[in-house]
Amino acid sequence: MNILQLLADLDAVDPEAYQRLSGRRGALTGLGQAGRRAVAAAVPLAFGTMLTKAYGRRPNTVLDVFTLALTLEYLESEFYKQALASTLAFPGNSKAVFQQIYKHEQDHVAFLEQTLRLSGAVLPDKPRFDFTGSKNGTQAALFPTVFQDFGTFLKVAQLLEDTGVRAYKGQVGTLITDNDLLEAAVRIHAVEARHAAHIRGLRRALGANVRDWVSPADEVITTKGVTDAVYAGEELTRQQLPVVDQKIPFFPTETTQIVTSTPAKAQISLGEAFDEPMSDVTASAIAALFIYG
């Protein structure tokens, strides 16, 4: 696979969509408390209840979603900007790959800023970031060599990209009443997922036990009580489905036949089969690990 061509193709597709969508003046106008009530009224009660039960999150406004998304895109964009400006040694053609990924993140920031600005919303201040996790030297660093060691850089990149993928998916329930905004978010989600998969491939090439997708069989790169929230809940092997006849079904059912070599492999495969959404609270807490001031 020519990853540079693939990323370039994605970049060629997305800005066009962003430009078209960002022209929707007033897309978010009035989506404060009134918008929250409108969203709640538009979404079938059973579905809204199911989402709340499934993900345990409070109902957001569209404005909340875009503000969270902008914070996460600031985070990723600044991460690659600082890495590319550092003395970090990028092996092979990987620097060109990360230059392309950085460009995507800049595009995402520009789109979200423009959409919020056109809606009349006040842009949130861009946070100050410290990717060592030391909060500008005020506490012990979580990743002291993030911009000195390529392996550590890739681990942090994977944590950030996987967080972004799950966070966008976690906000689908709020955007579901607006097809254009939902489409924009899902397009960005797809690009972030490509980034995550490629970074995982780079780590595997260096000998890491990791797949292109999140798997219970991946080697653990998180710290308990600090960064393990990135993958918390990803090991689930059953998925809640839309309510039918006032019943909440799950897949697989107790009688679903799953063909694998062993029961253990079935557990791993089911855990890999679904990418679990992440709540806004969890995504914000993970981002806060790298924000100071």
Image (spheres, rainbow, N blue to C red):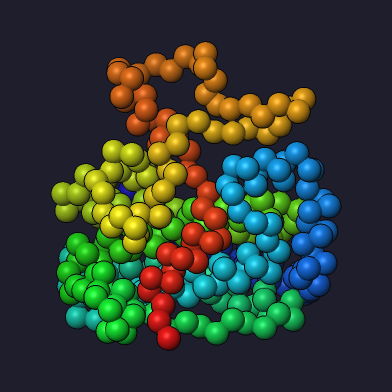
Say left or right for 292 vs 36. left
Q: Which residue is rendered at x = 71% and y = 64% of the image?
A: 61
Q: Which residue is rendered at x = 81% and y = 60% of the image?
A: 37
Q: Which residue is rendered at x = 28% and y = 57% of the image?
A: 223
Q: Is residue 244 above or below residue 21?
A: above
Observer-nearest residue: 274 or 179? 274
Q: Quick check: can you spot residue 205?
A: yes
Q: Quadrant of residue 80?
A: bottom left
Q: Quadrant of residue 250?
A: top right
Q: Position of residue 252 (x, y in %)?
A: 52, 24
Q: Is residue 228 above or below residue 98?
A: above
Q: Quick check: can you spot residue 2?
A: no
Q: Quick one: quadrant of the C terminus?
A: bottom left
Q: Position of residue 258 (x, y in %)?
A: 43, 18
Say left or right for 251 vs 242. left
Q: Position of residue 224 (x, y in %)?
A: 30, 55
Observer-nearest residue: 214 or 245? 245
Say left or right for 288 vs 19. left
Q: Which residue is rendered at x = 65% and y = 68% of the image?
A: 64
Marks counted in the figure total: 0
Q: Position of residue 205 (x, y in %)?
A: 19, 51
Q: Quadrant of residue 246?
A: top right
Q: Is residue 15 above or below residue 223?
A: below
Observer-nearest residue: 108 or 135? 135
